[in-house]
Image (cartoon, helix red, strand yellow):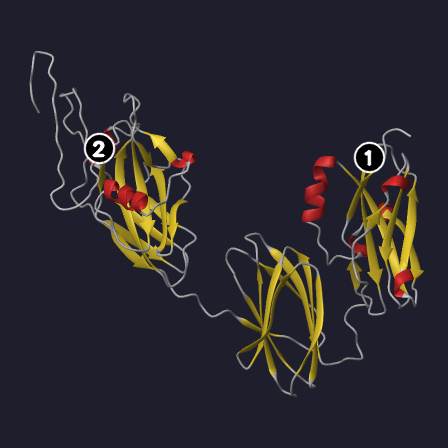
Amino acid sequence: MGMSYYSTVYMLEFLSTERDTHITVYLTTDTTSDHLYPELPSDPRIDVLGVDHTTVTLAWKHSPTMLRFQENVQYCLLMNEKHNYKSLCAAETAIRSSGMKSPPALALSLSPYSPNPQQVMILSDGELSIISKASSGEVRQVCVGTKNTYSVPNLTPSTQYYFDVFVVNFLTNASAAYTGTFARTLEEPDPKITELKDGKVMHLVLDGRKQRLYSLQYRARHKKVQFAFQSCSGQIEVEISRDEKVLMSESFAGLRHFTLKGRVGDIYSMNLGSTEPSNASVKVQVSSLFHKPFFPVLPESLKIKSFSKLRTCDSVTIAWLGTQQMSKYCVYKKQIEEDQVWMETRNADRCLGPESRHKSHKVLCKYFHDLNLRRAVTTETIRGLKAGTVYLFDVYLIGSSGIPVRYYSRVVKTRKKC
């Protein structure tokens, strides 16, 4: 600190004596402030309160500066998989040197009086965000305001993480670092294995966030085993193995039906999961009894086609493919708003049959088949509709097994003027 009653020019020179480096410099004419940098408590350690498979809970003692200047000071937490950082400056430098540029949304100017404000990667929205991702692991940062506890979510099981907490003055960009800590998340427990009974349908709800895999087992009663998976909502990932050898692995939305050949008494293991963070559901059926078909013979495509030229103010014509077997087809319609189209088609439960529909939605049921698959197509004109209105059309195929298969919904809007 220097005193002068005249206009004075100060010149500062910085020389790195060992290697290239980054530094931070803080200059001020306010000499009344006792503490230019935030203070640390007498015990600056970070305590690990709890560890599980995907979460680590941390706590630290309050900074004396936080108790006096709450409106300008925040705690910011940094997490990575390599090591601890002794300062926020060191952490920012490491992230910059990795070649990771900060997106504009993550850069926050902390020096409004400077003509060329420095920008630092600080987040103040309370959301843990990835600010750097490399082969050596990702770096995440979050500012938690005045809270001195935080549970770090969405971690990988059986992984060591390093945690640093900084108390930051957002007016000056000055910060102080707590003593960093580390913790290793717990190993993921073996999933519970459920035994499948021959021919019995099991309906599973898969949580895309918490329970990543659902494990099933089936003991073959014959050499050939038939498997059926019907995705009711969301996209499903299925893996089937025998004697620890993977026989098939596939992700799908819809219906899958196939046969595997082995020996009597073989044990088949199935792992099912959702490929998305949201929940998904699936119906599973496994059997060695081939005289009891699971699902009806399916057409080449389960899409419903509509004809724009045949669309009028009060009618719509749709078509769908059939099969060589005589089957029952039921058509349903539902009036919806234009802004409901995405929700109705995205969240539809494909496992629900006509019994779940309101009686007023039913249009007709008809039997149809054709030995020539090229001609196995049927059309239907639905009349009595409102002009300029959006309708959702569904077709259900009901075969000899009695299990309904729902075609993909079709949305059609009637003409406004005719």
Say whether residue 337 is left or right of residue 104: right
Task: Quadrant for residue 127, please give it.
Answer: top left
Give me the residue at 29% from left, 21% from top.
115
Q: Which mark is residue 65?
A: 2
- Residue 130, position in %: x, y? 40, 46
Foreground pick, 311 / 359: 311
- Which numbered disc, 2 or 1, marks the residue that appears first in the sequence? 2
Distance between mark 2 and mark 1 Cα atoms: 63 Å
Q: Secondary structure at mark 1?
A: loop
Which residue lies under the disc numbered 1? 389
Q: Up-down: is 128 above or below 1?
A: below
Question: Which amino acid type corresponds to the residue marked 1 in the rendered image?
Answer: Thr
Compare residues 107 and 354 and report the one nearer the observer: 107
304 vs 101: above or below: below
Residue 162 drawn at (x, y percent): 29, 53
Answer above or below: position of 59 versus 401.
above
Considering the image in quadrants, where does the C terminus appear?
A: top right
Q: Which mark is residue 271?
A: none
Q: Quadrant of the N terminus?
A: top left
Instruction: Give the label, 2 or 1, closer to the camera.
Output: 1
Query: In percent of the image, x 22 and y 32: which residue is there?
Result: 65
Amino acid on which disc 2 is placed = Thr
Residue 250, image quadrant: bottom right
Crowd tier of the residue under label 2, counting other residues whose Cα lies within 10 Å: few below 14, some 14–19, many 20 or above: many
Kindly tell me whether residue 415 is visible in this rendering. Answer: yes
Q: Secondary structure at mark 2?
A: helix
Q: Pick whichever, 359 or 101, lies toward us.
A: 101
Quadrant in the rendering for residue 42: top left
